[in-house]
Each structure stands twice: as structure tokens, then as C-alpha cells.
Image (tube, rainbow, N blue to C red):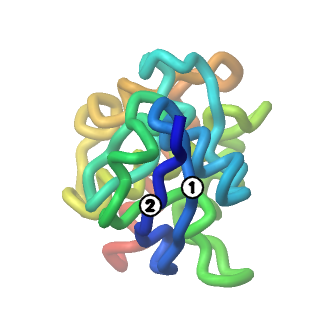
Amino acid sequence: MAKHHIAAVVNGDPVEFLCEPGDTLLDVLRDALGLTGTKEGCSTGDCGACSVTVDGRLVCACLMLGVEAAGTSIGTIEGMANGEELHPLQRKFLEHAALQCGICTPGFLVAAKSLLERSPDPTETEVRYWLAGNLCRCTGYDKIVRAVLDAAAEMRGA
């Protein structure tokens, strides 16, 4: 099978890659582009560990084909920090101990960032609803929700 040449923008940087027709976006990010922050949890779109944004929309990278990324703008966990300066969500996850093994953390952070871009002052119920597609086997969810609410308040200047 012939590989496809794809051009996209990842975390603000133009990229080009070759991929097989059946390669997922997760495969491309991790293997072709070396962006290993996005994790593979279930490969069925049920756990949210591979959450990324594509043209501003939250998607599971394991369910999207790499060839579908042509001409899109993709956001991954690697694009959250500004150099050495952590995004407020990343800092609050650390402060609230909202992570343990780390497999789910990148997906939660990308999903939470997507929520706060749409709703800068979410209620606890909205946070829990928005993050319902992300599963954690280690922490429970209270610390994660508290971290997101705290980051939202900080980002609003509250």
C-alpha cells in the first residue's frame, strides 16, 4: 500500500508526514512525529487518554485516521506549556495532586483546556460532564475536578 503525504499544523507548527491509510492519528503523533505525550489507553475511544483537539474540536486520536488530519490544526499535550512555563491547568494538577500513574493525565489536561476555552467559568457539574469521556483508574475524580475549577478561577483572574 502506498503511504500518503500529509501536511497539517501541530501545536502551531507546520508538519508533514507519511502514513499508511489505516494509521490512526494516535499512531502518527507518537510514531511519525515523536509526540509521545498523547497516550494509548483502550484504542476504542472509551478512555480519553488519547484526547487531542483537531480544528478546536476535542477528539480521540485513536478513532481518527492520520490521513484525515490533512490540512487541520491539531493540539496535543506538548502544546500546552509555554516553553518552561506550565499552563495553569498543568500547575493546578500538580498542586492538587490530580495525577498518579500519568496515563490519563494528558487526555484530561487537553479535555479540560478545551472546556475552559469554551466555558471559562464552568460549574462543577459542567466540569464533570465535560470530562466524563476521560477515565482514571488511580485518583478518583475529585482532585481532577478541583484542579480544573481552581485553574478556571485563576485564568479568569478571580
* 28 relative to 22 in the view: left or right: right
Residue 54 in the image: above or below residue 100: below
Residue 22 in the image: above or below residue 155: above
* 61 relative to 29 in the view: left or right: left
Please give the count of numbered marks on the rendered protein.
Answer: 2
Residue drawn at x 67%, y 81% as measured from the top left: 85
Residue 149 in the image: above or below residue 140: below
Which of disc 2 and disc 1 is earlier in sequence?
A: 2
**Residue at mark 1 to residue at mark 2: CA–CA distance:** 6 Å
Picture disc at residue 18: 1
**Mark 1 residue type:** Leu
Nearer the observer, 94 or 10: 10
Q: Position of residue 80 (x, y in %)?
A: 55, 68
Q: Position of residue 100 (x, y in %)?
A: 77, 34
* 126 relative to 39 in the view: left or right: left
- Disc 1 + disc 2, Cβ < 8 Å: yes
The local secondary structure at tag 1 comes to strand
Residue 122 visible in image? yes
Q: Position of residue 155 (x, y in %)?
A: 39, 73
Q: Residue furthest front?
A: 1
Which residue matches tag 2? 6
Q: Quadrant of residue 34?
A: bottom right
Residue drawn at x 30%, y 36% as measured from the top left: 130
**Mark 2 residue type:** Ile
Q: Position of residue 81 (x, y in %)?
A: 61, 73
